[in-house]
Structure formats: C-alpha cells, structure tokens
Image (cartoon, rainbow, N blue to C red):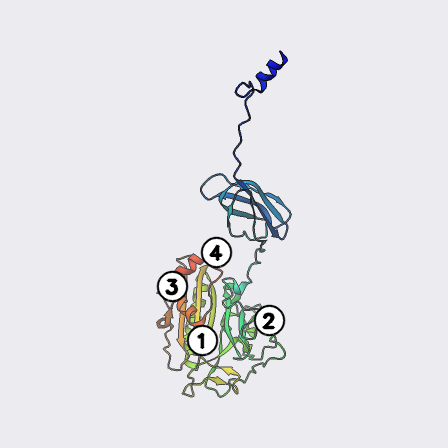
Amino acid sequence: MAFLVGSAIWAPGCSTTSDPTPQPQRQVGAVTGTYSPAAALTGVTATPVAGGTAVAATLQAGTYAFADLPTGEYTLAYAAAAGYQTPDPLGVTVRTNATVQVPALTVQPVPPPLPEHLTLGNPSGATPDEQLFTNYLLYKPQYALSYHRDKGIPNWVSWHLSRTWLGTAPRQDDFRPDFDLPNSWYHVPANGYSGSGFDRGHNCPSADRTSTVADNSATFLMTNMIPQAPRNNQQTWASLEDYCRTLVNAGNELYIIMGHYGTGGTGSNGGVTTTINGGRVTVPKRIWKVVVVLPVGDNDASRVTATTRVIAVDTPNENTVSTSWGGYRTTVDAIEQATGYDLLSAVPASVQASVEAQVDAGPTQ
C-alpha cells in the first residue's frame, strides 16, 4: 500500500502538487551620485522621460541613490538648499542589473548681490588681481571701473545715478593720480594731458556726484579720465550728462556705463593722436555710453523689462563731432560687438535680447 502511494506521488503525470511557475526577471537598475558641499541639496528626483511619476532618491550627506529603477531614460532634478543655486537637470539611462554612477556634482552658492555701481553687471568680468593688468577692477564708493595699466585709462566706468547722489557740493577740480592702483604701476599725473589738445574727460561726471565734497572729489581721480576731444567733452557729452540728470529729477534712477574702443582721436591740435603723456596714455578713437532708465524702486536688475528705456550712444573722439548726441544713438548690441563686453549681464537673458537690439527714439532734452 505504501508503495502504491509512493508511486502515485512520484509517477510522472500522477502528481497532485503543481511545480512553481518561474517568475520573469525584473528589469531594473540603480543610480548613485555624490555632491558637495554635503548640505547643498535637499532632494533629488528621477522622472521617466517617457512619462510617469517622479521617484525620490535616498539622500545622505554628500550622496544620493536610486535603487530598483525600471530600465529606461530618466531626468534627474535637483533641489538646492537655501543659499545654493539649483543645478541643471541631468539625463541618465538605467539598464538592467547595472548601476549608473553619475559624475560628482559641485553645487555653487548663490552669488552675493552685486554692489551698487555694478548692479546690472560687470561688463568685462574685471577683478582686483594685479596680474590681470589689462582688466583691473577698482571699486570706489562713487563708481566702479576696469583699468588698463598699459593704456593709462579705464576700459569702462559704471555708476548708479539717483537723487541721493545729487546735492550742493561745489566742483572740486582737484585732479590727481589714483594711488589705489598697485604701487608698481605708473600713476598718470594731474598734468599728464597738458598740451595734448585733449581734455581730461570725466567718465563719471563731476555733476553726477554733488552730494558731498568727498563724492565730487573722487570724480577727479585720473583713473576716471580719458583723453577726450574738447568739443566732444564740453558740448556733446555735457549735453547728454545734463539730460541724464533731468531724467533723475523727473523721478527716475539711472545705471550708466561709459567706455571707449579703438585708438586715435583728433583733439584741438588737429591730426590723429594715438598716445599722449610720453606714450603712457592711449587716446581712444570712439567713446560710448549706455544709460538704463528706471523709475525709482528696488531689485533693479529684475525690474528691467523689454519696454525699459535704454539709451546707447557711440561718438567719434573728434573735435568736429556734432554737439547733438541724439544723432549718435545706436544699439547696445553694436557696442558689445565693437568692444567684446557683455553689457547688462545681470539682466535676464530674454530681456537683454530685446532691449539691446533697439535704438532709442526718445527725447534728447
């Protein structure tokens, strides 16, 4: 009897117990990554490119991991902690039984707010590094500038103009060398332009800094000067400067950048002059200015829109220049092409594309 039972159990085709059904292999993989600083991220998610629910990573200090992700294409999205910039999303491909090791990620801190006179950007990326003598940043309470040691003049000067900068302080006329430059550099003296046929042309005007005597005096440092044809300085640019202050008195605040490009101007002595002061000071060929006009407010870079008035002017540095600056209006794009600078770089890119392509057609007085 026992045998018959055993035969019933073991004979082929006579079993009363079914064999287990084989399970299909799960098609999954894993993703791991590292980041620094260790507290810079608050989360990482993986979203299927083909559509579906995002999956959150297991996050530890400096590492993140996804286990058992179904195979396919994913987009990794990062959530940054306060004080850090959100990294760009990253695409990954998950394969069966494989682990994707994502390249190490360095999360950048949110940059501090730009100082007042560089609110709309640093056109040439100037830094206060003595080794970078062609693009040396000088930041003063009254304005910011990029200085070129071998040309003896600023590349550009940038300043904020509002009612707080205007007052009753008299013109100081105390032209002098700027000893904020490195000691080993040549310091253009107050008489460095004498007999040249060119004015000591202010970039940031004296009349834009009349709140205090010290503010006005700062505009007479030689690092704020370029050799400027007298008619250009005393009439054409003076008229534009007066108009800018009119805009401020009408309830606006301005961000102004002034610079130059090319070599060789024509002053009151006639002919084209390329350098003065024994070859230590370069004479520019063209002089430009960009003026951004905003109603008084806060968060200025973010308030620039496609309809913001931006005045861009580019004049020859010649003593025969027209006294009417309006005829020299151009686009910011054209000035950028001529100089290689990135003007208004702190303004959102889409807004830049709009305002920098336009020629101002507003009033001139």
Q: Quadrant of the C terminus?
A: bottom left
- Where does label 1 land, which residue? 261
Which residue is found at the position 49% from the left and 88% from the top?
195
Q: Earlier in the sequence, mark 2 or mark 4?
A: 2
- Where does label 3 land, which residue? 357
Q: Earlier in the sequence, mark 3 or mark 1?
A: 1
Gap in Å between the C-alphas at discs 4 and 1?
Answer: 29 Å
Q: How many marks?
A: 4
Gap in Å between the C-alphas at discs 2 and 1?
Answer: 22 Å
Q: Which mark is residue 302?
A: 4
Residue 6 is drawn in which quadrant?
top right
Gap in Å between the C-alphas at discs 3 and 2?
Answer: 33 Å
Q: Earlier in the sequence, mark 2 or mark 1?
A: 2
- Where does label 2 land, which residue? 129
The residue nearer to you, when weighing 31 against 95, is 95
Pointer 1 local density, CA inside 10 Å: few below 14, some 14–19, many at least 20: some
| For discs 2 and 4, the disc positioned in front in the rendered view | 2
Q: Name which residue type carries label 2.
A: Asp
Gap in Å between the C-alphas at discs 3 and 1?
Answer: 20 Å
Gap in Å between the C-alphas at discs 3 and 4?
Answer: 19 Å
Q: Earlier in the sequence, mark 4 or mark 1?
A: 1
Residue 262 is drawn in which quadrant?
bottom left
Question: Is residue 111 found left or right of 49 in the rendered image?
Answer: right
Q: Name which residue type carries label 1.
A: Tyr
Query: Which residue ends up furthest to the top in the rendered image?
Result: 1
Q: Is residue 54 above or below residue 246?
A: above
Q: Is residue 146 above or below residue 33?
A: below
Say what secondary structure mark 3 lies in.
Answer: loop
